[in-house]
Amino acid sequence: MNYNIRTISEGEGSLLQDFLYEAIFVPEGVPAPPKSIINQPELQVYIAGFGKKKDDIGLIAEVDKRAVGAVWVRIMNDYGHIDNDTPSFAISVYKDYRGLGIGTNLMKEMVRILKDRGYKQASLAVQKANYAVRMYQKTGFEIVDENEEEYIMLCRL
């Protein structure tokens, strides 16, 4: 499949609302939460005012000029928070476009950008049952901590 990865443009922050909702892991057989769930403070930390801080970096994957995936990072006190020098990842690809390498390539491109900008590491949190754990490991993330539901993963750049 042909797709293009580009930097998120100013004014496209609203796209991140959709991708944040898509990023919520819903186990098989469990109903999806209402879209309003993204208004909770622990989720708003991922998108509120995105683009206003120097550590806010976002990429969009497009197919036929339609956004189908996004990866974004920022230094925030989220589920995967390590310290105030480590950007945390958020990534989402629409269901119809999963399993095609788009998410992996978004991750790899963001890792490259972070290295180029001098960051030493990046982090993320992922539910243990999420199939994406393997993708994160393939892109250089390793499990450094865990709780009952999630792994905290770190990529040394």
Image (cartoon, rainbow, N blue to C red):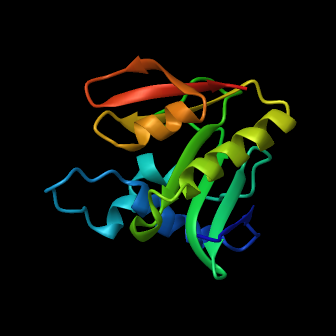
Could you tell me which residue is drawn at 33 percent across and 42 percent down? 130
Q: Is residue 115 left or right of residue 40?
A: right
Q: Is residue 118 visible?
A: yes
Left or right: 4, with 63 as reference point:
right
Residue 78: x percent and y percent?
50, 37
Q: Nearer the viewer, residue 96 or 89?
A: 96
- 93 to the left or right of 31: right
How many labels sit on residues? 0
Farthest left residue? Answer: 29
Which residue corresponds to the image point at 59% horizontal and 74% vertical from the top-left?
A: 67
Q: Quadrant of the N terminus?
A: bottom right
The front one of 78 and 111 is 111
Q: Where on the picture, by quarter, is residue 82?
A: top right
Q: Height in image: 35 above or below 53?
A: below
Quadrant location of the C terminus in the rendered image? top right
Q: In the picture, residue 128 is in which quadrant?
A: top left
Q: Looking at the picture, does residue 55 appear above or below residue 37?
A: above
Residue 19 is situated, as x and y percent measured from the top left of the image, at: 49, 63
Q: Position of residue 79 (x, y in %)?
A: 45, 35
- Residue 152: give x, y in percent of width and height: 45, 26
Which residue occupies 47% across, 67% down? 97
Q: Residue at x 47, y 59 (%)?
A: 20
Which quadrant of the structure image shows residue 113? top right
Image position of 64 with respect to 20: above or below: below
Residue furthest to the front in view is: 1
From where the camera sits, is residue 47 visible? no
